[in-house]
Amino acid sequence: MENQFSQYQDLEKIMITRDEIQTQVKEVAKRISADYQGKTPVVVCILKGAVMFFADLLRELDFPLVTDFMAISSYGSSTKSTGVVKLVKDLDRDICGRDVLVVEDIVDSGMTLSYIKKEFAQRGAASVRIATLLDKPARRRVELDVDYSCFVIPDAFVVGYGLDYDEKYRNLPDIGVLHPRIYTK
Ligand code: IMP
């Protein structure tokens, strides 16, 4: 089943299966739903990596919400964050006075989300919380509170379920460790 795509040959191993992802997304959605009762937050998808997580999570959230999208770049085509965060696409709406839930694929150095948190606070958001699919705490370079995280993972470069290397592998339904031969060529 896992090997339905030829791109799985580029993986060292599967780290998290599609079934494990779905189970954990439902669990985290329950916690988020309990915390946001009576509120109508703006739920922000950080493009492009969080698209799959965002789509699955949203369908499990049991409260009224509005959506928005933001694109940030910090990687280029490498596996190491440049540390330079660039805003590629801004939100469409004003978030002043709104509760904001930011949905991200992975927290690595923490630079991207700490930039977003500061930026949203400056724009007058009533609250800013973070929901991430993956958390790689070993690589953190700035202090950051992660409110909701589905999986804490070791320091490895992972792809699939929205996460990419050089824009590829986003379509894999499972999350796997990319074989180093792919990026050390
Ligand atoms: P940070 O600013 O270093 O926390 O990086 C966050 C961004 O880096 C994420 O939104 C991802 O796009 C990317 N990233 C970090 N680690 C990985 C990984 O293991 N695989 C794919 N992308 C990653």
Image (cartoon, grey):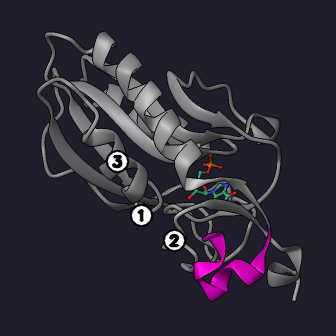
Residues under numbered marks 3 and 2 in contact, where contact means CB atoms less than 8 Å apart: no
Residue 113 magenta: no
What residue do we see at 40% from left, 17% from top? Answer: 31
Position of the N terminus by quadrant: bottom right
Residue 11 magenta: yes
User: Quadrant of the rendered structure where residue 181 is?
Assistant: bottom right
Q: Camera-side residue: 98 or 63? A: 63
User: Magenta segment, which residues?
Assistant: 1-12
Estimate the x, y position of residue 86 in percent, counting from the top left.
Answer: 48, 60
Give the label, 1 or 2, closer to the camera: 2
Q: Please, what is the three-letter code of the amino acid marked with disc 1?
A: Lys
Residue extending farthest front: 1
Circle 2 crowding by C-alpha within 10 Å: few under 14, some 14–19, many from 20: many
Estimate the x, y position of residue 45 in percent, counting from the top left.
Answer: 33, 49
Which residue does the numbered mark 1 point to in the structure image?
Answer: 48
Residues under numbered marks 1 and 2 in contact, where contact means CB atoms less than 8 Å apart: yes
What residue do we see at 70% from left, 62% from top? Answer: 176
Taking 80 as reference, is 109 above or below it? above
Circle 3 crowding by C-alpha within 10 Å: few under 14, some 14–19, many from 20: some
What residue do we see at 87% from left, 74% from top? Answer: 180
Taking 96 as reference, is 157 above or below it? below
Residue at mark 1 to residue at mark 2: CA–CA distance: 9 Å
Q: Please, what is the three-letter code of the amino acid marked with disc 3?
A: Asp
182 left or right of 105 in image: right
Give the label, 3 or 2, closer to the camera: 3
